[in-house]
Amino acid sequence: MMGTVPRPNILFILADDWGWGDLACYGHARIRTPHLDRLAAQGTLYTQFYVAAPVCSPSRACFLTGRFPGEVGFHHICDSKLPWTSEPHGVPDFLDPALPTVARTLRSAGYRTAHIGKWHLGDADGAPDPGAYGFDRHHTTNSRTDDLRAEFYRDSEVGVPRPEDDVAFRRQSSRMIVDKAIEFLDEAGDEPFFLQTWLLDPHATLYPTDDGLETFRQFSPVGIDMPGANAIYYAVIAEADRQIGRLLAALDERGLTDDTIVIFTSDNGPEDLWVRNASHSAAGSPGPFRGRKRSLYEGGTRVPFIVRWPGHTPAGEVDDDSLLGSVDLFATCADLAGVPAPATGGESMVPALTGTPLVSDRPLFWEWRFDNPSHPLHCSPMRVVRQGPWKLLANPDGSRTELYDIPSDPMELTNLADREPAVVARLTTLANEWASSLPAGPQSPTAGSNAYPWPRSTSARPLTDQDQD
C-alpha cells in the first residue's frame, strides 16, 4: 500500500485506436503532439505497456474491472447498432454491473468519480448507464443515452440528426469531452477525484478541421485536390493533443497539478486500411512493430503509456524494463487510494510509476477468436501469453506456434519455438489452462490463420466459363 503518501487525484485519459508510434515522443517524425510530449517530459514514458484486447469494448472492460476481457464474456465489441459484430460473436448486451469496478471501489474510498466520453460497454435498450458501475457523473457517447451527441444536436438546433450533423459532432468531439471534464474539475471540491476522460479520436471516421488539414497539407498527394490519409490522420491527432493540453492547463489553473496523477494511453493499436470507414485515413503507426488493430502481434496490443505524478514519478525518464498491462489499472488505482482491490490477473504498477522498474513473472493473456482480414503479416495466431521476456502465440489446434524473446526481438521476426521446446511447453500449458476457464463462445473457423490465396496454375484443371470471362 501507499502508506503515508497522500492519496492523489487520478486523471485517466484514454484515446481510441491511437498507435504506439503516434506521438513525437515515441519516435514519429511527422505527427505533432507537443502537449503529450510535454507530459512525458514532466513524467515517465513506458515502452512495454499492453492492453488486454486488440479492439475497443474488451479493452475497456478490462480497464474498468481489472479482469481479462474474455473472463467476462467480452471477446469482441459490444454495439447494438452493429448487430453483425456483437450477436455473432457471443458478446453480452452490456458489461455485468455486478462486477467489481475501479470506479465503485474508489467511490467507496471517498473519491468523486466521473466518466466523460466514449463508453462502448453497452448501448442496447436496458443497458445500465455508467452510474451503475460507480460513476457519480457521466457524459457519454456509444452508450444507451448517448447524451453527449444528443446535447450537441440540441444545442445546434438540429433536432433529428442527419449524417452531415454527425460529421460536425465528430469534428468537435474531443473539445466537447474535455469541456465536460473541465466542468467536473470545477465541481470536484476538496475530495479526491477519479476522472476517466475517454476520447473518440482517432477512431474512424475522421473529420479534421480545415485549419488542421492546412497545417499538414505538405503530407497530401501532389497534384490532386484531396487531403490524403496522412494529412487527415495527423490533423486529428494534433487536435486531440491540443484538447488534452487544455485539460492539463485546467489542472494548472485550478492548482491541482501537484496533487494529480495523470495517465495517458490507448485502447488498442491503430486501425487498418481495409476497414471501410478508415479507408481514407488509416495512417496510424504501430511504431516498429508487427500488427495493428485486431492483431495479437505487438502493434495490436502494445500502446503508448505516459504517467505524470509530480514529486513521485521521475521526470523525463523512459522505462524500457517494466512489463505493464491494462489489467493492472484497477489494482494500481486502489493502491493509490489506500484500499484493497479484488484479486484479478493484475497487480499494482505503483513501484514502476514511482521509479522502480516492475519486472514480474506474472503472465498476460490474450485471445482473438475471429478473423483478421488484414495483411497476412499482421494476422497472428489466436491465443497468446506473455511471461517475462517470452511471448508465445499459438493456435489451439497446433497449426501455428511462434515464440519470441520480446526484449531482444520486439518486431517478432525470429521464431524460437523450435529452439526452446521447454519454454513452449510451459507457456502452452499456461495459455491452455487460462483459455479453458473462459466462458464458451463462437469462434471463426479461420481464426488464427494467415493464409493467403496464392496463385494456382490453371493447367492442372479444365478451364471453366468463369476462367474465360
Image (cartoon, grey):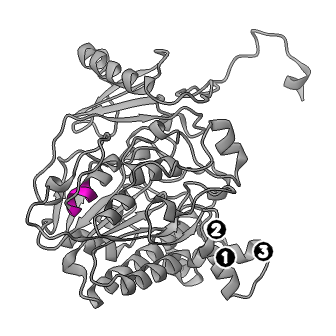
The location of residue 351, given as percent across then percent down, is: 14, 54
Q: Do residues under tags 3 and 1 come within 8 Å of each other at their CB atoms?
A: no
Looking at the image, residue 335 sits to the left or right of residue 298; the answer is: left
Residue depicted at x 54% and y 31%: 369
Circle 3 crowding by C-alpha within 10 Å: few under 14, some 14–19, many from 20: few
- Magenta residue span: 332-337
Which residue type carries mark 3?
Answer: Arg
Q: How many dots with numbers?
A: 3
Q: State the image quarter where residue 460 is shown.
A: top right
At numbered mark 2, what does the secondary structure look like: helix, strand or loop? loop
Which residue type carries mark 2?
Answer: Thr
At numbered mark 3, what does the secondary structure look like: helix, strand or loop? loop
Q: Is residue 124 magenta?
A: no
Residue depicted at x 27% and y 86%: 252
- Mark carried by residue 150: 1
The location of residue 191, given as percent across then percent down, is: 28, 78
- Mark carried by residue 162: 3
Measured in 3D between alpha carbons, the distance from the residue under mark 3 to the one under mark 1, in whole angstroms, is 12 Å
Residue reaching furthest to the bottom: 253
The location of residue 462, given as percent across then percent down, is: 84, 11
**Pointer 2: what residue?**
145
Q: In this orientation, does residue 232 appear? A: yes
Q: Do residues under tags 2 and 3 come within 8 Å of each other at their CB atoms?
A: no
